Image (cartoon, rainbow, N blue to C red):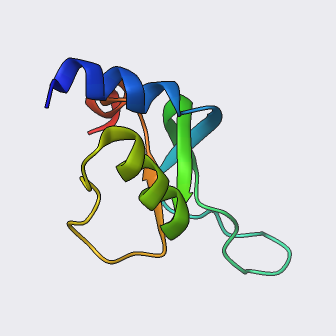
């Protein structure tokens, strides 16, 4: 399998725009209710990606000619370009 071609074929399928957040601190208490509010977050990735259902994983396996997503058992997978993963690890 030509990995460069597989990468290009896969990234061509990433047509959604993703925004991935990471918690960046503790929730702030609401002064009126005393309840915790939302925790502050930082955007760690924004760009192309896809959320694939089990069906989408099968289709991409057919596009690439190899079942490369079978290392786990999840109903959905978040897929980002390899270059995007380097930014948020």
Vertical position of residue 87 compared to residue 50: above or below:
above
Left or right position of 64 against 34: left
Residue 48, given in percent of the width and then of the height, sits at 55, 29
* Residue at 55%, 53% in the rendered image: 51
Q: Nearer the viewer, residue 4 or 23?
A: 4
> Toward which corner of the image does residue 2 lie, by quadrant?
top left
Residue 79, given in percent of the width and then of the height, sits at 43, 45
> Toward which corner of the image does residue 50 lie, by quadrant?
top right
Vertical position of residue 41 compared to residue 34: above or below:
above
Residue 38, given in percent of the width and then of the height, sits at 67, 63
> Toward which corner of the image does residue 15 lie, by quadrant?
top right
Left or right position of 56 against 8: right
**Can residue 25 be seen in the rendering of this structure?**
no
Q: Nearer the viewer, residue 46 or 21?
A: 46
Q: How many marks?
A: 0
Quadrant location of the N terminus in the rendered image:
top left
């Amino acid at each position: 399998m030509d990995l460069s071609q597989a990468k290009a074929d896969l990234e061509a399928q990433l047509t959604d725009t993703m925004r991935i957040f990471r918690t960046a601190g503790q929730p702030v208490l609401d002064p009126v209710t005393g309840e915790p509010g939302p925790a502050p977050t930082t955007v760690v990735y924004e760009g192309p990606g896809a959320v694939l259902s089990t069906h989408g994983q099968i289709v991409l396996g057919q596009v690439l000619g190899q079942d490369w997503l079978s290392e786990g058992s999840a109903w959905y997978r978040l897929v980002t370009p390899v270059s995007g993963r380097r930014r948020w690890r």
